[in-house]
Image (cartoon, grey):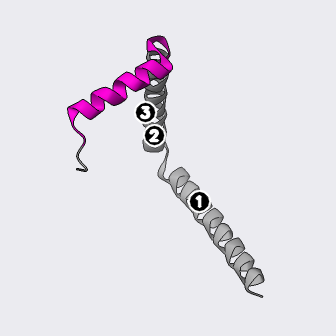
Amino acid sequence: MGNIGWVQLLIVLVIVLLLFGGKRLRNLGGDLGSAIKGFKKAMDSDSDANKDAPPNKLEQQNQQQDKSSETKQDTTKEHDTVNKQ
């Protein structure tokens, strides 16, 4: 009863096509595809930048991230303490 068959998928597809129209769905698909490509490109360039960076630069970035996460945790603890009182 919880399984979705091809008939149900076809009905949903027809309803979506009637609501949005073919041209809008085509544009939406193109926009979604370009967004995914951009995301993948950004992820690849970010990992390439980290590979090319000297080890000292990476260590500094990690230390800065650790400090910022510690600050966030301290702020949260202070906020929780104030709320309990």
Give amino acid for label 1: Gln
Residue 71: quarter of image: bottom right
- The residue located at (47%, 15%) in the rendering is 21
Residue 30 percent coordinates (x, y)? 45, 18
**Is 38 contained in the magenta span?**
no
Q: Relative to residue 15, is residue 45 depicted above or below?
A: below
| Residue beneath disc 1 | 65
**Is 18 contained in the magenta span?**
yes
Q: Nearer the viewer, mark 3 or mark 1?
A: 3
Residue 5 percent coordinates (x, y)? 21, 37
Q: CA distance from mark 3 to mark 2?
A: 18 Å
Q: Relative to residue 56, is residue 28 depicted above or below?
A: above
Report the front residue among 39 and 16.
Answer: 16
Label 1 element class: helix
Q: Badge 1 local density, few (<14 within 10 Å), some, or many (20+)? A: few
Range drawn in magenta:
4-24
Which image quarter is the C terminus in?
Answer: bottom right
| Residue beneath disc 2 | 52
Residue 4: quarter of image: top left
Q: Earlier in the sequence, mark 3 or mark 1?
A: 3
Label 2 element class: helix
Q: Main secondary structure of the magenta part?
A: helix
Q: Is residue 58 left or right of residue 17?
A: right
Q: Nearer the viewer, mark 2 or mark 1?
A: 1
| Residue beneath disc 3 | 40
Q: Relative to residue 62, is residue 13 depicted above or below?
A: above
Q: CA distance from mark 2 to mark 1?
A: 19 Å
Give amino acid for label 2: Asp
- The residue located at (29%, 32%) in the rendering is 9
Q: Are marks 2 and 1 in contact (CB under 8 Å)?
A: no
